[in-house]
Amino acid sequence: MAFYGFLSILLWVPLIASPITYLLSKNGPGRAKVFATIVSALEFIYSLVLWYLYVARDKYSDLIAVADGFVFHEKIDWIVVGNLKIYYALGVDGLSLPLVVLTTLIFLVSIISSYYIHEREPLYYSLMLLLMAGVMGTFIALDLFLFYIAWEIVLVPMFFIIAYWGGPRRRYSAFKFFIYTHLASLFMLIGIFIVFKAGNYTFYMPELKTNLANYAELSKLILAFYLMAVGFITKFPQVPVHTWLPDAHVEAPSPGSSVLAGLLLKMGGYGLIRLGVWMLPKQVFTDPSSNVRLVLALLGMVSMAYTAFVALSQKDMKRLIAYSSIGHMGIVSLGIASYTAEGINGAIFMMIAHGVISPTLFLISGVIQHNAGTRDMTILKGLWKKLPITSTLLVFSALASAGLPSLAGFVAEFLTFAGLFKSDMFGYGHTYFWITVVAVMSVIVVAGYYLWMLQRIVFGEPEHIKVEHKPHFYEIFPLWVLSFFILLLGLLPFIVLKITDQFVSIIIPPA
Amino acid sequence: MTAIPIEYPLILSSALFSLGVFGVITQKNAVRILIAIELIINAANINFVTFASYNPNADISGWVFALFIIAVAAGEAAIGLAIFINVFRNFGEINVKHLFTLREV
Amino acid sequence: MESEIIYYALGVVTSPFIGSLILTIFAFIHYAKTHGHEETEENNHEEHEEHGLKYTPLENFVSTIGILSIFASWVFMLLLAIKFFTTEHHGAFLTTSYDFFGFPVTQNIQVGLLVDALSVYMGLIVTTLALLIHMYAREYMHGDKGYPRFFATFNFFTGIMLSLVFSSSFFELFIFWELVGLSSYLLIGFWIFKPSAAHAAKKAFLYNKVGDVALLSGFLILYKLTGTLNFMELPDKIHNLTPLQTALISVLIFGGVIGKSAQFPLYTWLADAMEGPTPVSAILHSSTMVKAGVYMVARVFFLYWQAHEGEYNFAGDNWALAVVAWVAAITALLAGLQALVENEIKRILAYSTVSQISYMVLALGAGSKTAAMYHLLSHATFKALLFLTAGAVIHVVHTNNIWEMGNLRKKIPKTFTAMLIGAIGLSGFPGISGFWSKDAVLATVYYSDVPGNKILFTLGVVTAFITALYTTRFIIVVFFREPTPENIERVEHAHDGGFFLTIPPLIMAALVILESLTFIPTPIFKFEEWLMEWLEPGVHAHEVALTLPILSAIVVLLGIGTGIYLYYYNYNILASLNQNKVIIPIREFIAQRYYIDKVLYWIANVPAMIVSRLLQDIDIKIIDRTIIDTWIVKGSLGLAKISDVFDQGIIDGIVNGVWMIALTLGRAFRKLQTGIVSNYASIFAAALVIFLGYVNFLIFIK
């Protein structure tokens, strides 16, 4: 007897816990964080259990429902209007499972590291849990309607987290964030409707995938891809629709930044792979008349090179990390554009790797701000003497982000570049080669700005900064957890790649 | 007995009515207006009585109306006077040209 | 048999890592306890001299763990070497490689341990030197507050370097290739509070990164073309490549060597890397890490030479080797000249290292793996020795500048003896280790068919002369020349260091002598031929004419003689030379590193910063302010205004119209409400009249 509720639990627990958190702590403000921490910790443990069950699904085949290529499959009618059926359908596969675990992990560490927040505490944790439900829903929804709802819900709590608990220009940034992503998701909605029409009037993704494979008008699907890609690429984001990201990151509280960088960006990448690469027929990417891959590759290359240079002239540490995030998402674009098993696996792995590295960097910048009083790299100097462990972790995660081998970022970069070099981009032979060359070269600049950042922050004699006390346990502990995962993913990448390849081998069957 | 032609009382009542209306329109003193109203009422009474007596069916309802009107007019006069006394107390005069507090500004 | 070798190799690689892990955890606990406040000053020499050599318990614990783990590695290495070289099997052993990424498409990207003659040979050098230098560091770093951190990183480096040596695939090699770069970064910047150290560390990492990217591109193209990266499989798969492809890949891979092994034009980082503690310079920046490039080219030498019927030959138009040889020859000369004008002892040795590594690369370019590895062995030993003794000298006189030293031979006799032996080795004095290996390199170049091999040979000989000259120069200035008056006091108090500061250099000196004895070709045993038999089975050394070693010996003796004459007997000539108008600008040109740094700064750093500012402006001014704020936001506001006008003018207009009419009428009728009874009465009367008139009119019509 299969159990149909594995993922509903994952989705509904934070959703229900969100108002409870708020109500519980009306009288006792300290309760909110305890409750939110417990909920997110349980979610994390539960997601690990799901990981185990996923891997061992053959052993528990009587317990776990597998349908349409998705594990923990759930599907019930939700809204029925005439012939139109909208399902409440959930499921995970090799693409979404690592992201689900990443979601619970990042929320756990972000919630723990938000303990410094004392202003409107109940509301904050309540919004965090709502955000968690939204992100989770995006990753596990199998119905486009549900997907879109979850996608849009995410905007609301994030908007308030930036606008209430942010820095001095928080209102501007919050609005910019909201308008950018909301506007872009309207394009996505149009794209979804085109797909909906082309795929024989259904929102259920596996069914759409089957129906679209028989659809004759390729140009329409390419148009749909571009429209949807506007939404995803803005969320990613890629140059030239990226300017909301540095502002949002700089102004958001550091746990907010860590969720933003760790998960919200990944929603864009997930969408691009799920709704683009997976759902649309192969011809959209491989047909000679389609230049989808070239556009993606160009976007990725420009994003990598452009942001690498822009990051060089940043003074604010968070801004620098934000720009580096855009560059890393450029690698995701390039990996998808390569359309090889290595490339797409690399792209997915990049999302996971960046999902643990960039929150570490953002949380460290938060620790530095709270303890040294500033994030300005021209003032920070000689941090090693004041905060040795934080500095060590900063060096560690900055180098991880710069793609140091044996750490998570390298695996993704290596696979993507291997895919790029290996890829046959018919018709664009030379262009494609040079795109690859520029992308690979920009890694030097990435290393350059990170090293320069370290030189300015960690090295030297401290002059202007004062540190009164050690960082709190709740500030350092999440960094250790994330650093552990950075190292684990770098040394044993197959624990994730074995899962993601189950997804990729459907798209690109091994020869 | 030679019957008085019906025109005569009707002319009388018309004249009284016209006088009354004239009084109501032109007079500024509220008491005079009250008196003019009494004239109009009386003109109506005369009409009722006239038509009652000239009715070939000897119906008395006209008389009854006249009596009712007299009674009501008495009450009305009493209330009107009471209002005017109050108006006088509040405004210090009863010149209706100056009493326009109910007007839209 | 085979399994034993593999277990030994595992032991070699893992023991330094175990040491490093223990020390890292220890260091973290230490810093968490002390909150970093302890680490305030550079190693405090004064204190150490006053209190004698008293290691704190912390230092004892840390250095013991560090040295023991390296010692374990060394023992394993010895066992491995004995086992390996006594077998008849000349092939390679491979551990079970494991598939790093774990999915089918990338199954050819593997990691494992490859044990063959080359890696055993290199591993022996690395472990032996690492052991001696670790022992040296125990005393050298005494008193430094970063003691645990130093040993943790140092052990980490040793482990990484050994893993690099035993790498079984390009992928694995690249991982450790970058990680030795990381350890180099951490160790150069070890004295974190020194801005120059931070700068040098960054420079080293970045210069290496440039090379690494070339290397990465090179072997990824190889991966695309052959589908594998394993060293064991590649030789069979590269036959299908066109000469152009092979050349391109080879040159790109050589890009990595230019970065890591400090070749022209990216060699200046090595001189700056001397900001690190001396043990670091001794092992990373002279004897092992910078030789990784040489090692890697030797490892994939089949790419540079395509195997052909068991003999190495030029593969058609494969010009990659010519590039390698020419870059190396130019670097050797440039760096040698720079060593001649440099005043800081460690920098002299650094430039000398660059120059000597170029010899090895030159040998590779000329087509001999054996000559390169031969020179690598002799150079690694005497250069590590020179660095250790230079460190000891600096340790006792507290200065880096050779002109501030002088006449030290009586003050520090043990160090002097050791350094002199090292210097003789470096100069290529006939009969000593450097002479034999250098001679092998020069002979290879002379008999090779690289385009312009005679010019390359001449450059090599000139460099040999310069090497002898600068070696003599710093030995004489440091040990024989009378110190200048202001430095007498400094030199007076110098005395030999403690046990660990003197014994490892002396052991190394003994090793140099041992090598020299081994290298002497006798009819019974010729080291070069033995090495060639292992490294390049089936290849036979070219018969070397006797004139070559004689020429080499004459040149070296000439160099030493010139040095003694210029710097010891006739100092006036040097002084007048230094005043010479022709010499001064040349000297300045060399001292400014041929402006390589400036040129690189102007072609890389400056444009990068300009582009950076420009793009930053694009981001803020064009995208944010113009496109977003002006076009999109103002545009939407404009659109909003238009819709507003439509909304208010037309749609609202209709609604408002109704409202306006009602209002106007209301206003008009309101006038009637005068509140004056007479007016109402008049209206009433008028209405009555009209009504009655109307009724009468109707009646009248009827």
Image: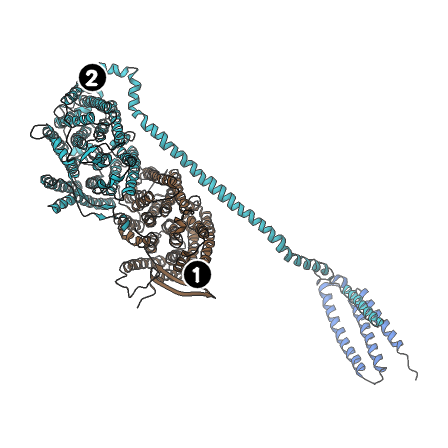
On the image, the x and y values in percent for residue C585 come to: 31, 19
On the image, the x and y values in percent for residue A222 come to: 44, 50
| Quadrant of the snapshot with the C terminus of chain C | bottom right
Colour style of the rendered protein structure: by chain
On whether disc 1 and disc 2 are found on a single subunit, the reply is no
Task: Say what amino acid the circle numbered 1 marks.
Answer: Thr
Q: Which residue is mark 2?
A: C566
Q: Nearer the viewer, residue A28 or C258?
A: C258
The chain coloured cyan is C
* Callout 1 secondary element: loop
Q: Nearer the viewer, residue C81 or A251?
A: C81
The chain coloured brown is A
The chain coloured blue is B
Q: Chain of mark 1?
A: A
Left or right: residue A248 versus residue A402 is right
- Asked whether the viewer can see residue C184, the reply is yes
On the image, the x and y values in percent for residue C448 come to: 21, 27
Left or right: residue C690 versus residue C624 is right
Determine which quarter of the picture holds residue C561: top left
Q: Which residue is mark 1?
A: A202
Q: Nearer the viewer, residue A445 or C314?
A: C314
Q: Chain of mark 2?
A: C
- Asked whether the viewer can see residue C38, the reply is no
Task: Say what amino acid the circle numbered 2 marks.
Answer: Leu
